[in-house]
Amino acid sequence: MGRDVFRSRINETKRKITDWLKEEGYSSIEKPDPHSHFNILAKIGSSECIISQDVRHSDKLFISATVVLPDDQVNLLKQMTDERKNALFWELEMGLVKNNELGNFRILPNPPQDIRTVFICSRTLFYDDLTKSRLIATIMVVLRAALMVLLMVEHFIGVSQRDQKSPFSV
């Protein structure tokens, strides 16, 4: 495939994605990244995800979200017993592994003792299977996984009433 055809195909895919996002009420912002052909921040309400195509791949893209726990939750997690931290870690891992629509995830920086961030990524979306329905459904899978992480952490730290303004309230 010639370089111009390749670049044209990427630009057409990016245009379709941004058009579909707009049609469905998402805002989208291009976030330049030297490791991506395109990197689009998609936002609806307080929920966000990234739609990106790595420069190493000519016909596939991924959708990801990063859950960064607030400092007050991180502090409460640190106060839990090791047994409770292990239980949370395994529940998070099993909850994410069981979701067959996800491709990858990482719990950081040093689980189970120190959990501050959870990175969630979709399964691969190939160009030849990319439709508006598939894109939006995959975004929802990633955002719901992010919501599951937040709810699980809140459960383990003993939040009795959920803040309705929490991010990822899908």
Image: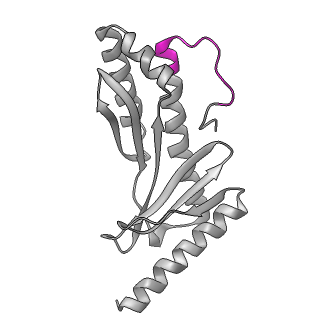
Magenta residues span 153-165
63 in relation to 105, above or below? below
Rendering coords of residue 25 (x, y %): 72, 56
Q: Quick one: 115 or 22, which is closer to the camera?
A: 115
24 in relation to 1, above or below? above
Q: Residue at x 59, y 62 (%)?
A: 29
Q: Residue at x 38, y 23 (%)?
A: 91
Left or right of 23? Residue 140 is: left
Q: Is residue 9 visible?
A: yes
Q: Is 157 part of what is drawn in magenta?
A: yes
Q: Is residue 94 visible?
A: no
124 in relation to 126, above or below? above
Q: Is 24 part of what is drawn in magenta?
A: no
Rendering coords of residue 40 (x, y %): 53, 62
Q: Residue at x 29, y 10 (%)?
A: 82
Rendering coords of residue 14 (x, y %): 54, 72
Left or right of 29? Residue 104 is: left
Task: State which quadrant residue 131 falls in.
Answer: bottom right
Give the image's coloring scheme. Answer: one colour
Q: Quadrant of the N terminus?
A: bottom left
Rendering coords of residue 3 (x, y %): 36, 89
Left or right of 80? Residue 152 is: right
